[in-house]
Image: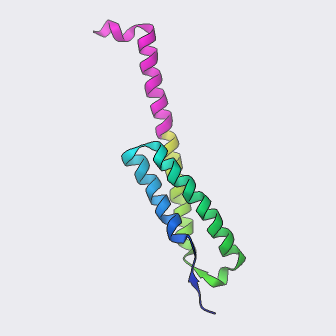
Amino acid sequence: MSQQPLPGASTVLTMGILSIVGTLICCGPFGAIFSIIGLVKAKTATQLYESSPESYTDYSNVKTGKILSYVGLGLSLISLVIVILYFGFIVAAITTGELSREF
């Protein structure tokens, strides 16, 4: 029996990479979207692999993509918290009058 590449393995890896790059270069929501897509595809590919492991190769790409997706999701959540804190401090400075005293 010949082994074939696991369907979706390269997609999971690509989405994991895009989640990290999207978070660090562009903005957090794009990274979160890519990481969620990667995790959903990884679940599907893992279920397919576990049903017949001797038929497929490239399961390591799925594991790597899943790890990258989790890292991208974590970075996205951290950037979201930083943005919320940043704008929260700005609103607090405006409402307390601290910003107008400096000028």
Q: Quadrant of residue 9?
A: bottom right
- The residue at 45%/32% (across/down) is 83
Q: Is residue 83 magenta?
A: yes
Which stretch appears magenta? 79-103
- Viewer-proximal residue among 33 and 23: 33
x then y, percent, for residue 82? 46, 33
Answer above or below: position of 7 versus 65. below
Q: Quadrant of residue 95?
A: top left
- The residue at 64%/66% (across/down) is 44
x then y, percent, for residue 76? 49, 44
Q: Residue furthest left?
A: 103
Secondary structure mostly seen in magenta is: helix
Answer above or below: position of 18 versus 50. above
Q: Is residue 77 magenta?
A: no
Q: Residue furthest bottom?
A: 1
Answer above or below: position of 80 versus 4. above
